[in-house]
Amino acid sequence: MCRKNGREIVRLRYPSVTEARMPYLLSSVTYGLMGMLKAWFEQGMDLPKAELLQMAERLLDGAAAQMI
């Protein structure tokens, strides 16, 4: 699901990502986001959702910037 839906989102936000790099970017972001959510739940959801979302956006932007 993340790879299918994520591909469309990445394509819209970062149109210069090549098809050859797309699977790597999607894997990096998917596992990174899952790790963040896991940690958030383990910590009792102590961070506000808005802060977690901001961190997730930074993760996506950083990963994309390094792979474009």
Image: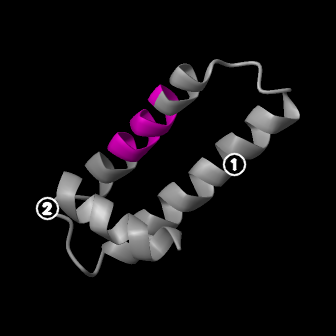
Is residue 14 placed above or below 61 in the rendered structure? below
Q: Which image quarter: residue 61?
A: top left
Q: Nearer the viewer, residue 66 or 15?
A: 15
- SS for dot 2: loop
On screen, residue 47 versus residue 21, left or right, reads right
Q: Residue furthest left?
A: 16
Which type of secondary structure does the marked residue at label 1 adopt? helix
Q: Residues within 10 Å of mark 2 (few under 14, many from 20)?
A: few
Residue on which the image places disc 2: 15
Contact, mark 1 vs mark 2 (Cβ under 8 Å): no
| In this rendering, position of residue 50 left or right of residue 68 | right
As drawn, the label of residue 35 is 1
Residue 17 lies, in percent from the top left, at 20, 65
Q: Is residue 22 part of the magenta span, yes or no?
A: no
Vertical comparison of 26 with 36: above or below: below
Residue flagged by tag 1: what amino acid is it? Answer: Gly
The residue at the point 59 percent across, 51 percent down is: 32
**Kind of residue at disc 2:** Pro
Question: Who is closer to the viewer here, 1 or 26?
Answer: 1
Task: Please give the range of residues in magenta.
Answer: 54-62
Q: Find residue 28 and report its horizontal and vertical position in percent.
A: 51, 60
Where is residue 8 shown, x and y percent of the image?
29, 68
